[in-house]
């Protein structure tokens, strides 16, 4: 941001939300924004992945409370996402009910996000056999996405207030992905952003949630079967129906906490003509210097 303001760079990505208004009023800088194809969410483990013959087998139940769908639903009820968007991100995000955005084929506009209801969360915990609450770990990167650590801190605080005592562990990005995520060691909860530029539900649901995929820690055979149907069916109307059913799992079985669609804010020198894109591409041929 300092380099942008001194003119050392002409375009800067990921402007922090608290600087957006300030830079919009800067005499030499403007903000170009676009609702991103990227969503931020927190997958919740319901299986434990073990290495077998050079690949991961992810079908063994996770040895902890998140194997229970009522616990995963309780986690969702305990998070006030709207408050996080307002107070942490200063409104620079769009609430989502699933890890898809309205830009993706397979998005179901009829689904509504979990409402914030800590009392309901405690009730579900008790029904799941945890009347005194539970202890969990939430892993998060630091600096990969705008305010990612601060968002994770807010989530951990809200969960703790609802009896889901959450320890936050923050990691440098390379360590986070290589040592935790790709090795299935980020359980039981980890914050991630997924930019789906295939514009199709499959490219989010399969790599992130289909059992035995590289980043998936979720097992549900009905969900897996729907994704297989979606990959092989060539009828668009039927595919929409398939992904509508698959999206329902994020309410009924809660394999993640869907948080928000990222708004990409770029700081742009006013002498440069360039417009932000939803797919995060920065193309030189689309830029020009204003006369």
Image (cartoon, grey):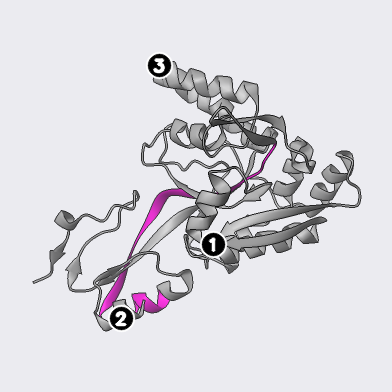
In the figure, residue 270 lies in which quadrant?
A: bottom left
Q: Is residue 31 magenta?
A: yes
Q: Nearer the viewer, mark 3 or mark 1?
A: 1
Q: Is residue 53 magenta?
A: no
Name the one closer to the observer, 233 or 119. 233
Q: Position of residue 159 (x, y in %)?
A: 74, 57
Where is 232 relative to 244, above or below? above
Residue at which label 3 appears: 235
| C-alpha distance separating marks 3 and 2 | 51 Å
Question: Residue 204: which numbered mark, if any?
Answer: none
Where is 196 relative to 273, above or below? above
Q: Earlier in the sequence, mark 1 or mark 2?
A: 2
Q: Quick one: SS at disc 1? A: helix
Whether residue 69 sits left or right of residue 219 in the image: it is right
Q: Position of residue 79 (x, y in %)?
A: 69, 54
Residue at which label 2 appears: 5
Residue at point 67% right, 45% down? 114
Q: Nearer the viewer, mark 3 or mark 2?
A: 2
Q: Earlier in the sequence, mark 3 or mark 2?
A: 2
Q: Position of residue 239 (x, y in %)?
A: 46, 22
Whether residue 213 sits left or right of residue 222 in the image: it is left
Residue at point 78% right, 42% down? 64
- The span shown in magenta is 21-46
| C-alpha distance separating marks 3 and 1 | 38 Å
Residue at which label 1 appears: 148
């Amino acid at each position: 941001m300092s380099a942008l303001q001194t003119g050392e760079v002409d375009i800067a990505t990921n402007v922090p939300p608290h600087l957006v208004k300030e830079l919009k009023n800067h005499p030499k800088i403007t903000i170009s924004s676009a609702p991103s194809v990227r969503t931020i969410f927190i997958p919740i483990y319901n299986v434990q992945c073990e290495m077998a013959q050079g690949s991961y087998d992810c079908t063994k139940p996770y040895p902890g409370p998140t194997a229970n769908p009522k616990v995963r639903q309780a986690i969702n009820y305990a998070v006030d996402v709207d408050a996080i968007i307002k107070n942490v991100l200063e409104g620079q995000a769009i609430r989502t009910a699933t890890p898809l955005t309205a830009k993706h084929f397979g998005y179901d506009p009829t689904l509504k996000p979990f409402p914030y209801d800590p009392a309901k969360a405690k009730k579900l915990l008790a029904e799941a056999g945890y009347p005194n609450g539970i202890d969990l770990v939430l892993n998060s990167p630091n600096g990969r996405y705008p305010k990612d650590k601060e968002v994770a801190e807010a989530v951990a605080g809200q969960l703790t207030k609802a009896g889901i005592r959450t320890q936050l562990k923050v990691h440098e990005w390379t360590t986070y992905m290589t040592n935790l995520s790709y090795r299935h060691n980020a359980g039981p909860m980890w914050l991630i952003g997924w930019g789906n530029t295939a514009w199709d539900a499959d490219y989010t649901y399969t790599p992130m949630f289909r059992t035995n995929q590289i980043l998936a820690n979720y097992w549900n055979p009905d969900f897996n079967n729907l994704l297989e149907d979606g990959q092989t069916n060539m009828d668009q109307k039927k595919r929409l129906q398939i992904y509508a059913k698959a999206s329902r799992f994020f309410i009924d079985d809660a394999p993640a906490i869907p948080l928000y669609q990222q708004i990409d804010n770029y700081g742009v020198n006013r002498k440069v003509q360039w417009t932000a894109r939803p797919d995060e591409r920065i193309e030189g041929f689309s830029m020009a210097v204003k006369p």
